[in-house]
Image (tube, rainbow, N blue to C red):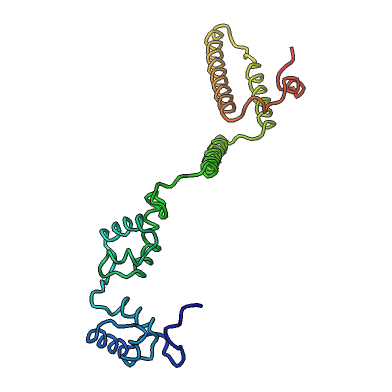
Amino acid sequence: MGRKPCCEKVGLRRGPWTADEDHKLMTFILNNGILCWRLIPKLAGLMRCGKSCRLRWINYLRPDLKRGAFTEIEEDQIIQLHALLGNRWSKIAAHLPGRTDNEIKNHWNTRIKKKMNLLGLDPSTHKPITVSPKQQQQQQQEEEEEEEEDINLGLQKKQEDLQLGSPMDLLNGYEMLWETLDNGSKIDHPKTNPSNSFSLDDSLNHSMSESSFQQENSLQCWVDNVESVLSWDEFLPIEDIFSFGILPVN
């Protein structure tokens, strides 16, 4: 057999309590003390259930009820008591004057559990949270993917800055550069008077040396930029390079 209900819930008032009901309940308990909660509604002239009167008194009307937010000292005390007693909120409330078991439970679920998780403690065992091997592997995999993504973004940005194209575009650039060097080497010396031959030859030699030096520097810089972005595996084999006519065949 189950427990007998506290009252017959026929014709009883439900919903929020009114100020007149609160006054009747407080006046009766302050004058007569706490009796059997099943009898208090009839004796106090209330159309309420005995359980409703008990919860209203404990949670809202008793004089020693403490209002306001929980202090840090109270939170530390709740954590210590919870480590010893577990989820026995009524026993925990007995060590905190003015606090109800329902209020402590709600504060534990909404604030203290989150605070302990941020500190790396398990709220149920009060021990440091241990990460499973599966979670460690997943976390390591996520870190490796982030590093790989950063590397790819860096290479892409570097290639965009250099404005380099495909390997075929690079081969075409090699061909144009070789043609430029060949045309520069085929400079016809003008016929001049013997008296002026020395000065003209010196100037032409000087200009040709400067031109060839600049071309070599530009070629070297261009090759260095290519090597820093693309590996030599992306270029065509040496036979294909000769077939394109980029390099002269001896």
Q: Which is nearer the eye, 145 or 167?
A: 145
Please name whichever residue, 163 or 158, is drawn nearer the observer in this view of the structure.
158
Comparing 115 with 90, the one in front is 90
Most distant residue in the front direction: 1
Q: Nearer the viewer, residue 103 or 190?
A: 103
Is 64 on the left-hand or right-hand side of 152? left
Is residue 153 shown above or below 189?
below
Location of residue 91 (image quadrant)? bottom left
In this view, 31 is above or below 125: below
Q: Which quadrant does the C terminus fall into?
A: top right
User: Which corner quadrant of the image does residue 95 belong to?
Assistant: bottom left
- The correct choice, above or below, for 181 with respect to 66 in the image is above
User: Which residue in the rendered view is the most extreme toward the top?
Assistant: 194
Asked if 197 appears above or below 2 in the picture, the reply is above
x and y percentages locating residue 180 in the rendered image? 64, 23
Residue at the image position 45 percent from the left and 45 percent from the top: 130
Q: How far from the left and from the top, in percent, is residue 51?
A: 39, 81
**Residue 216 screen position, x and y as percent:** 57, 19
Asked whether, in this view, residue 216 is left or right of residue 244, the answer is left
Q: Position of residue 14 (x, y in %)?
A: 42, 87
Q: Residue at x 42, y 83 (%)?
A: 6
